[in-house]
Amino acid sequence: MTSTEYTVRGMTCGHCASAVTEEVAKIPGVTDVDVDVAGGRVTVRSTGPVPDAVAAAVDEAGYEVVTG
């Protein structure tokens, strides 16, 4: 089991959290998604590493994973 935290730009409300959770949860291997809107963080638990897929899912939801 892998747990990774991502910083996400643009989330401001519960709808944002729902949109990100819905998209990230679709990724094969993802077992849990926890969104902290106030902190701008998304914690993803999965059966293995999925960083590229998470970034793409967050983008699909209309937000941006902050890298570097």
Image: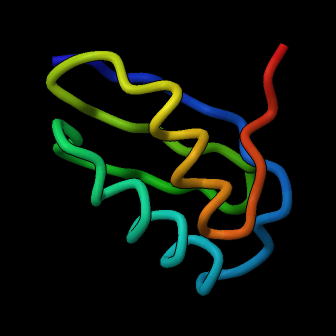
Residue at x 39%, y 71% (from the top left corner): 22
Q: Position of residue 56 (x, y in %)?
A: 57, 46
Height in image: 42 above or below 5? below
Height in image: 22 above or below 36? below
Question: Residue 37 vs residue 56: left or right?
Answer: right
Nearer to us in this view, 42 or 27: 27
Height in image: 14 above or below 9? below
Nearer to us in this view, 17 or 25: 25
Question: Residue 48 vs residue 7: left or right?
Answer: left
Image quadrant of residue 38?
bottom right
Residue at x 19%, y 43% (from the top left corner): 28
Height in image: 12 above or below 56? below
Image quadrant of residue 4?
top left
Q: How many marks?
A: 0
- Quadrant of image for the C terminus: top right
- By what rule are the colours in the image chosen? rainbow
Q: Position of residue 65 (x, y in %)?
A: 72, 40
- Quadrant of image for the N terminus: top left
Question: Residue 20 vs residue 39: left or right?
Answer: left
Residue at x 34%, y 22% (from the top left corner): 3
Q: Position of residue 27 (x, y in %)?
A: 29, 48
Image quadrant of residue 41?
top right
Q: Position of residue 29 (x, y in %)?
A: 17, 36
